[in-house]
Image: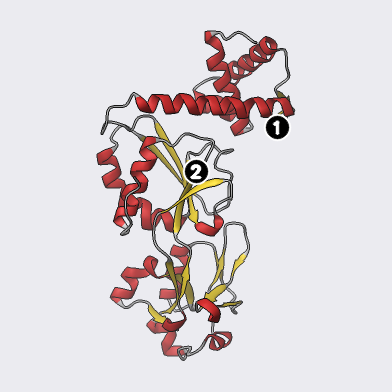
């Protein structure tokens, strides 16, 4: 059995960060080191273990097969250390360290922003980083503690916690648009309308789901304007540029002030709830549970036990 020295723990952390970031430079920045220091740590670790852990080229770095297996076991060990540290926290005084989240724009607007005041009150010492990103990513590989997506976008190997109930999707238009166009009465009427296209984070076009249950339909609607941002879509719809397909919760203010109006209300579709998700191989940051419970309570859900 290989002996363990005090310096190994730091080198193990450097190695795991390089594997996660796939870059000596980025890992060094995250750890507050110079790239040369990170490189020296890896040379020292590989020499000590007598094994090659990383494949290096001028453009990329990746773990060897042995290095990947080693990283997976090390991560389990660091998770165990993290869990042990949680035990040392006094009840009600959790919340140390950093919590890094990757969320998509609608979730940032509807869930994160309202939760921030209460989160900072309960976790004043946590360094919270929220990256707003609509593209599908590997949260573990990119160094995030958790992500937030709709349920059907959560990878199968992740632990997912619902934050809301089903989300209602509606078709809306502005008074200006309806002065020039008749209101659609049935889904097939949309073929004669100008519709604002939605581009998903993976660069695929989003089809409009109308109705529910056995009468649900997924339509490809006509339109020359394609947008990948909800806020811009709402602005364009308010300007009368076309009909939009959006979350009803996202346009609560516009509906109240009358700048947007729902059509085909009986064809509104219930979509998946928002979910927080994280890897089963990583310890559950204590502040993450606090944030989850704040969001769930603000959206009429029960707290996690």
Quarter in which the C terminus is drawn: top left
**Which residue in the protein does label 2 denote?**
278
Q: Is residue 59 visible?
A: yes
Crowd class of label 1 (few under 14; some 14 to 19; many from 20; radius 10 Å): few
Pick the front one: 238 or 78? 78
Percent of width and height locating residue 78: 51, 25
Quarter in which the N terminus is drawn: top right
Please give the name of the residue rendered at 30% of the width and 54% of the height, measured from the top-left corner. Answer: 297
Pick the front one: 12 or 102? 12
Q: Which one is closest to the eye, mark 1 or mark 2?
A: 2
Find the distance from the CA under tag 1 to the CA under tag 2: 26 Å
Percent of width and height locating residue 300: 30, 59
Please give the name of the residue rendered at 34% of the width and 52% of the height, measured from the top-left corner. Answer: 295
Secondary structure under the numbered disc 1 in the rendered image: loop
Mark before the other along the chain sequence, 1 or 2:
1
Pick the front one: 240 or 297? 297
Q: Is residue 19 left or right of residue 148?
A: right
Secondary structure under the numbered disc 2 in the rendered image: strand
Please give the name of the residue rendered at 34% of the width and 34% of the height, measured from the top-left corner. Answer: 126
Which disc is residue 60 wearing? Answer: 1
Q: Is residue 113 left or right of residue 189?
A: left
Q: Is residue 42 left or right of residue 119?
A: right
Compared to 7, does 78 lie above or below?
A: below
Q: How is the rendered protein coloured?
A: secondary structure
């Amino acid at each position: 059995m290989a002996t363990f020295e005090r310096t190994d723990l730091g080198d193990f952390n450097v190695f795991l960060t390089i594997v996660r970031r796939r870059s000596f430079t980025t890992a060094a920045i995250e750890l507050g080191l110079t790239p040369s220091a990170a490189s020296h740590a890896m040379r020292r670790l590989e020499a000590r273990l007598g094994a090659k852990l990383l494949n290096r080229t001028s453009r990329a770095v990746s773990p060897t097969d042995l290095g990947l297996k080693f990283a997976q076991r090390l991560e389990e060990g660091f998770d165990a250390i993290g869990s042990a540290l949680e035990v040392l926290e006094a009840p009600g005084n959790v919340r140390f360290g950093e919590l890094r989240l990757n969320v998509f724009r609608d979730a940032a607007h509807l869930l994160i922003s309202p939760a921030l005041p209460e989160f900072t009150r309960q976790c004043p010492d946590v360094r919270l980083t929220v990256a707003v990103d609509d593209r599908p990513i590997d949260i573990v590989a990119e160094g995030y503690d958790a992500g937030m997506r709709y349920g059907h976008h959560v990878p199968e190997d992740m632990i997912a916690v619902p934050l809301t109930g089903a989300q209602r999707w509606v078709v809306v238009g502005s008074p200006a648009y309806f002065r020039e166009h008749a209101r659609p009465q049935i889904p097939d009427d949309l073929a004669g309308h100008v519709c604002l296209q939605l581009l998903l984070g993976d660069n695929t076009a989003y089809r409009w789901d109308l109705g529910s249950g056995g009468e649900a339909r997924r339509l490809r609607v006509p339109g020359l304007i394609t947008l990948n941002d909800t806020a811009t879509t709402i602005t364009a719809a308010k300007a009368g540029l076309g009909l939009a397909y959006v979350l009803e919760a996202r346009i609560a203010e516009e509906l109240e002030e009358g700048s947007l109006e729902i059509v085909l209300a009986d064809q509104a579709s219930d979509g998946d709830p928002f979910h927080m998700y994280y890897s089963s191989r990583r310890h559950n940051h204590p502040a993450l549970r606090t944030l989850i419970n704040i969001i769930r309570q603000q959206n009429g859900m029960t707290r996690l036990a």
